[in-house]
Image (tube, rainbow, N blue to C red):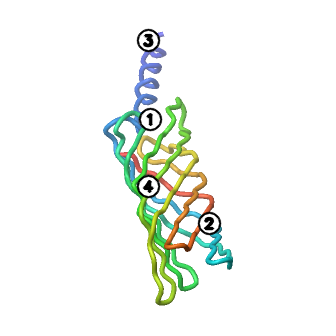
Amino acid sequence: MKSKIVLLLVVISFSTLSFAQTNKGNWIVSGNSSLQVSSSKLEGAGSSTTTVVFNPSLGYFVTDGLAVGASVNLLSSDGTTVYAILPAVSYYFQTQSQVKPFVEVGIGYGGISADSDSSGGLVLGADAGIVYLINQNIGINLGMQYLRGDYDGFVNNTFGGVLGFSIFI
């Protein structure tokens, strides 16, 4: 009986630690890779490309489950470079499992350059998905991402799946 009580206390202690990642005062560092389909329209012309993107992000939990931070998106394809810097707010739903659903929204500035032309403008972004916590500090991200950039009349809509990792500090 005594060993069962000790075992129960150990399980509870480790369970509390394993679910503490999204608590107030913690940091999250993420790096995501995504396969995205981009659709661009300029004065009636349209094009579509498929590309791979890497976007690092950093956030600080101001309260349990709610993080504020920023992400950077950078892609280069067919001589065109697109970047976005997005201050963002993320919410991680508090579950009692290793799977934590999340949503994120951001608004910021971005730019696009192709050949010798370049322009910048407003970028809106949204992410949704899950983080599967491997252990107390490392999680695997799986989700969807949408970015919309309006660069002086050139509108770039990007939608795709995201796969990455998160480190909780």
Which residue is at a point 54% across and 51% down the rendered structure image? 141
- The disc placed on residue 2 is 3
Q: Is 129 placed left or right of 67 in the picture?
A: right
- The disc placed on residue 36 is 2
User: Label 2, label 1: how many angstroms apart (C-alpha)?
Assistant: 32 Å
Secondary structure of residue under mark 4: strand
Foreground: disc 2 or disc 3:
2
Q: Position of residue 67 (x, y in %)?
A: 40, 43
Secondary structure of residue under mark 3: helix
Amino acid type, label 2: Gln
User: Label 4, label 1: how many angstroms apart (C-alpha)?
Assistant: 18 Å
Secondary structure of residue under mark 2: strand
Label located before the other in sequence (2 or 1): 1
Residue 102 or residue 158, whichever sits in front: 158
Neighbour tally class for label 1: few under 14, some 14-19, many 20 plus, Cα within 10 Å:
some
Residue hosting label 4 = 30
Amino acid type, label 1: Ser
Neighbour tally class for label 2: few under 14, some 14-19, many 20 plus, Cα within 10 Å:
some
Q: Position of residue 32 (x, y in %)?
A: 50, 60
Amino acid type, label 3: Lys
Query: Contact, CB < 8 Å: mark 2 with mark 4?
Result: no
Residue 138 or residue 77, whichever sits in front: 77
